[in-house]
Image (cartoon, grey):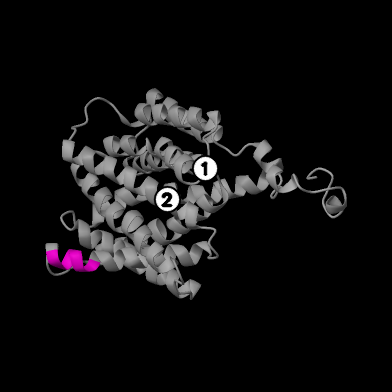
Amino acid sequence: MEANGRWVALTAVAPVAWGTNYFVTHEFLPPDRPLYGAALRALPAGLVLLALSRKRPHGAWWWRSAVLGLLNVSVFFVLVYVAAQLLPTSVASTVMAVSPLTMMLIAWLLVGERPRGAHLAGALTGLAGVCLLLLTGAEAVSLPGVGASVAAMLVSSLGYILAKRWGGAGTDVLASTAWQLTAGGLMLLPAAALVEGPPPALPVPALLAFGYVALVATALACVAWFTGLRHLPAGTVGLVGLLNPVAGVLLGTVIAAEALTVRQWGGLLLVLAGVVLGRPSRTADRAPKSRLSARSLRGLGRRDCRGISRRDC
């Protein structure tokens, strides 16, 4: 359980960093350049991680990197950028709070991780907490913005589970994260040049903001997130992602020097309760790492079982 606690803490770095990303993007980055904004976020992050890992894709990872880069980077970053421009943070974050349930369903279909009752309860509790924390009834709702946010949630959930499914194929997290960020950034550049024209002129504050977004809210956050997916159930990782709107609200409260209402405190506590409900179980920790299947043992006699423990035989 201590090891799982460390993986949960490391994974939490990602949603906390993403919670600060909205404020930085909204305040310092050009609002009308989503393709360049996504490319300048992804490509520097990917190149930095590529320099650190010093590994190139091999075998199936050439096309896997392209698929993951398209889903988790190119399409997702652009959709998030668009949703942030068309929707209040509260509405966009509430839509994204459905992602734990979506990740559980996709993980069940693709990697055979049946969601536990605690995971489902945690997802519903966390979703209720996000609604209490963010929704006040005064938000303007843009249907295209909601569509972009829903699409971003679905695309990223699929991409994350594919990354989890392919993650054990003989490569480390740093390298695979570098490949998909670099691939996604390279796919975005020609699209940005074709649709948005020349790159925008960036003042010093915007350059510093892009540096933070690329290195902290993308490179560091993605490595932490995909490391969590490698070591934890998808349901647990999805619930940790609910810390994203919590971090955003707390950051806004600190900057604006505003006190949280009783309702918001209640929502925050519900979100944290949802994350706690989804923590890995002790039963999973005590499960043996490898067990012989019943089918493989049917033909074994006593002589064949000499080198096998009594528990397995």
Q: Which mark is residue 242?
A: none
Measured as percent of width and height from the top left, residue 164 is found at 48, 52
What amino acid is found at the position of numbered circle 2 in the picture?
A: Tyr
Q: Secondary structure at mark 2?
A: helix
Magenta stretch, overall SS: helix
Which residue is at 18% across, 58% downward?
33
Residue at position x 54%, y 28% from top? 117
| Position of residue 98 in the picture relative to residue 8 (left or right) | left
| Label 1 crowd (10 A; few <14 / some 14-19 / many >=20) | few
Find out whether residue 192 is within the magenta segment.
yes
Q: Is residue 48 above or below residue 261?
A: below
Residue at 61% x, 49% y is 6
Check disc 2 and report the residue beneath it.
160
Residue 273, given in percent of the width and then of the height, sits at 51, 30
Q: At x 29% / y 58%, what residue is drawn?
A: 74
Secondary structure found at label 1? loop
Q: What range is drawn magenta here?
A: 189-194
Tell me residue 23's x, y (percent).
30, 48
For residue 65, what is the image quadrant?
A: bottom left
Q: Quadrant of the N terminus?
A: top right
Label disc, if present, on residue 112 of the rendered structure: 1
- Going by the numbered disc 1, the residue's amino acid type is Gly
Cβ–Cβ under 8 Å for marks 1 and 2: no
Observer able to see residue 208 = no
